[in-house]
Image (spheres, grey):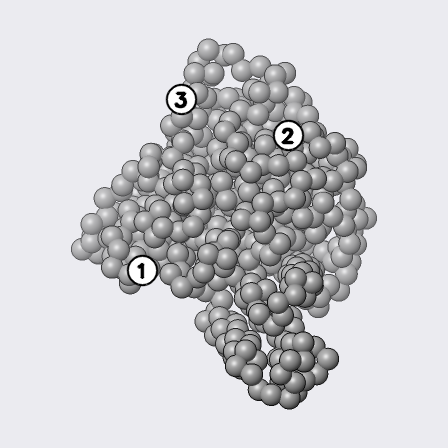
Amino acid sequence: MPVPEGLRGPDEPPHPGLWGPLRTPPIGCGGLSLALELPALVRQLRAAWRARRGGPRGPGGSHTGTWGESDKEEVEEVRRDVEDRIAHVEAGGRRTSGHADASPVERRGSYPLIDVRILKSKTSGQQGEVESGRRQMRRQLSFQRYCHASRLLRGLVPRAPPSLHLLDDDYLGQAAYMLSKVDTWNFDIFLFDRLTNGNSLVTLMCHLFNVSGLVHHFQLDMVKLHRFLGMVQEDYHSQNPYHNAVHAADVTQAMYCYLQEPKLSEQLSPLDVFLGLMAAAAHDVDHPGVNQPFLIKTRHHLASLYQNTSVLESHHWRSTVGMLRESGLLSHLPADTSQNIEQQLGSLILATDISRQNEFLSTFREHLESRDLDLQLASHRHFILQIALKCADVCNPCRFWELSKQWSERVCEEFYRQGDLERKFDMEISPLCNQQADSVPAIQIGFISYIVAPLFEEWHRFTEPSPLSHTMMGHLHRNQARWSRLLRADTQTQPRATEPRPGGEGEDIR
Ligand SMILES: [Zn+2]
C-alpha cells in the first residue's frame, strides 16, 4: 500500500502543512466557537488600545501616546476579524468548498474558512508572543471540542450504567437499552443519535471498545479515548445531510455486526477488531459534503495535496492520524506498533474509495472461487476487513425500509446541494447531482444495481451460512423492488429523465 509522503513516527513533530497546530474550527458549533474566541479578540483590541496610549505592551514605547499607522492597522485588522467571525456564524457556519478568498494558510482542512487570522495578527513582531497566541488558540480549539462532545455541558444529567465507565456517561435509559442490542441489524441509529443528544459516535465507540475488551487489551486511557472520539465526532460536518457523524456511527454499528459473523469472530485478533472499529468511525471524517470530482474541478487544495487520487479518503485517513497523535491515544505503545496501526488504518480507509470498487470485487471473487482465503494469515484478515468496511459503508439499502429510505433521501440531498453549487457557479453539473433530472428512486436503483448488490452477493457467499447476510439480502431485494415501483410512479407523474445511471467506476457517488 503506498504511504503518502509525510507519515512519521508518533514522536516526530507533525508537518506544519498537514498537521499544523490549528485544526479547522467546528462549524457545527459556530456560536460556541465565536463565544470562546471573542474574549481573546477583545484582549487584542485592548492591547492595541494600550499600545496607542503607550501602555506596558506598547510597541517598544517608541511612539508612546501617539496613534501610529501600525496601531490603526492593528485595531482595524482585529475589528475585521471579529466581523468576519460574526458573519461566518450568522451564515450558519457554511461556506462553499474551494472558497476562492481563503489564503493558503487558511486552506488547511476541508473547510474553506479556518480561523487562524489571530495567529497572523501583527500585534507584535516578537516570536514569543506569536508562540503564546498559538498555544492559546490550540487550547481554545481543544476546549471547543470538549464542550461539543461533553453531554454534561449540554445539560444532561449523568447516569452511569454499570458496564460503561466513561467520564461523563450520562446515558439515558433508552440509549443504554439500545446499546444492549447493538449487535442487531435493525438498530435505529437515528433514534440512538437523538437519545444520546447527538453523541451517537462517541457513545457507540466507547461502548464497543469496552464490550470488545479493547480498552483492557490495549491498556487505553479512557480520558484520551474519549478525547480522541470527541475530536473525530466533531470533525464530521453536522450540516452535511449524509456524510456526518451519524453516518459514521451507522457504519461503525454495521461493522461491529460484521465482525460478529461466526466465520470472522473466531479468527480476528484484538488488533483486527480495533482497526475495524476505528476505521469505520473515522472513515469519512471532515468530509466536505462534495465529491472528489468537485474538489478537482474547483482546484481545492486537498485535490492538489493528494494529486487527484483518493483525495477524500486520504484526507480522512490523515485527519485521523492527526487526531490520534494529538490525543496521545496510542502514545503508550511502542513506536512501531502505533505506526503500524496508522498505516493499516490508512489501508482500510483508502479501500472505501468507490472508484476502486471493481479492483476489490474482482480480487474478492478470485479468492472465493479458488477457496484460498486463510484467515490465519494477517494479510487475508486485513483484506476481509477492507471488504467488511466497504460493505458497512454502502449497507444502507440492506437496512429495513424506514431506515434505508432516510439514508437515500439524505445522500440525494447532499448530491443535489453539490449540483446547486455547480449551477450557481456555472459549472457542469455532476452526474446524479441534478435535482431536476436525477430522482431519488433512479439514483437508488443505479446505486443498488451497480455497487451494492454485486458487493453483497459476494459477501453473502463468503459469510454463508449467515442469518445476517440472509436478512440483508432480503432487505436489499425488497428495497430495490420498492424503489422500482416508486420510479415507475415518478416517471408517470414527472416529465424529467429518470433512467437509472451507473454509479460505478469513476463516478464518485459516495
Ligand atoms: Zn462513508
Answer with the quarter of the image where residue 325 lies. Answer: top right
Identify residue type, mark 3.
Ser
- Mark 3 / mark 1, whichever is N-terminal: 3
Instruction: Confirm if mark 2 falls within 8 A of ligand 1.
Output: no
Q: Does 463 sit above or below residue 307?
A: above
Q: Residues within 10 Å of mark 3 (few under 14, many from 20)?
A: few
Identify residue type, mark 1.
Asp
Classify residue 100 as left or right of residue 82: left
- Give how far across and how far down residue 276 sits, in percent: 60, 34
Q: Which mark is residue 362?
A: 3
- Mark 3 / mark 2, whichever is N-terminal: 2
Identify residue type, mark 2.
Asn
Q: Is residue 62 visible?
A: yes
- Mark 1 / mark 2, whichever is N-terminal: 2
| Secondary structure of the residue carrying numbered label 1 | helix
> Do the residues under discs 1 and 2 have CB atoms within 8 angstroms?
no
